[in-house]
Image (cartoon, rainbow, N blue to C red):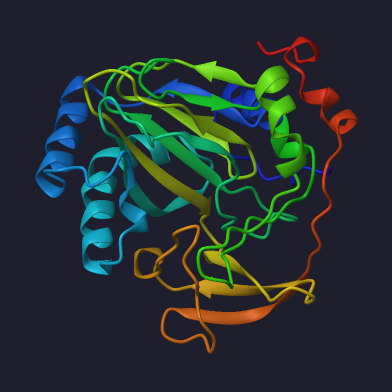
Amino acid sequence: MMIPPTRVFKDDALDDFFRREGYVVTPLLSPDEVEQLVKAHDELIPDIPGDFYVTMFTLNPDFRRAVSKAIDDVIQPAALELFDNYKTVISSFISKRGSSKQGVMPIHQDFSFVDQDRFTGVHAWIPLIDVDEHNGCLSVYPGSHSLINHTSALSCIEGEYHPSPYDSVRQILTEKCAVSVPMKAGTAMFFNERTLHSSEENITPQNRIAASSAYIPSGESLRVYRRNQDGDDTLDILTVAEATQVHMHMGYVIEKPYTGVLQQIGKKPYKIEYLCPEDLLPLYREHRKSS
């Protein structure tokens, strides 16, 4: 699959690794900035309401906006300096309660926020405590961003997830392709919005909290895609005036007619093409050479 020629990072080494592997890890925040974000998290979310909780998934748009601003005030001065002409569009806290039982985040691709044939959308994940395999660090699937041109869309049926080309090969991805990435607090993982990732339970007693942000090229408008009913092999293309005003939970339905901050600008032909095991050979850990 052709990767758009968009340059993402100013630094050549970061940009080359990101382009090849689909993610990159780099120091970002000072201990004081981490402490500031932990304080903001605890003030805004004094009691984490579930084993796995994402503030972007809450119904209250004012709360989503307050969270996004609290994160952006701390993160973006450093993060945006790394990018080559990008802007942030939304930020969230992502929390896992200590000793979680329902905190697994299975293999997935984040929502598509750009025209992926032309541009590269980037998402960041920044743990606010040290993370490893015991408390829900991320696992990534290097090279998965370049394997197939999949658009991750919002649902049209309540509670139903948008199907993925990877659904039939999840076990092989876990066994052969996953790379667990322990990280220090304040370190950032930036990944292509196409890059597959996942995380396991937090088996420690301490809550695992992280901040996340999404970035798109500065001159572009944020967009989302909405899946249509079965039998209609198209996605609606919607521009978004303000990301915090859209409830983008995986199982939440955006209803027609579109109003307010959502404007339809077209349709995209799209039909899921499920992968077979042989398609994953380029992703096998022993076949990838990461520097």
Write the residue at 55% across / 61% down.
219
Where residue 232 sits: x, y (%)? 78, 77
Name the side, left or right, on which 246 lies relative to 129.
right
Q: Quadrant of residue 61?
A: bottom left
Name the side, left or right, on which 37 lies relative to 277.
left
Name the side, left or right, on which 204 lies relative to 172.
left
Residue 142 appearing in the image: no
Name the side, left or right, on which 81 lies relative to 147.
left
Quadrant of the snapshot with the N terminus = top right
Residue 147 against residue 237 in the figure, above or below: above
Q: Quadrant of residue 81?
A: top left
Write the residue at 67% across / 52% down.
119
Nearer to me, 76 or 132: 132
Where residue 237 sits: x, y (%)? 64, 73
Nearer to me, 11 or 150: 150
Q: Quadrant of residue 220?
A: bottom right
Write the residue at 35% across / 50% down.
91
Where residue 131 sits: x, y (%)? 36, 18
Where residue 110 sits: x, y (%)? 55, 48
Residue 163 appearing in the image: yes
Q: Residue furthest bottom?
A: 257
Nearer to me, 72 or 264: 264
Write the residue at 64% across / 32% down.
22
Residue 131 against residue 215 in the figure, above or below: above
Residue 204 against residue 33 in the figure, above or below: above
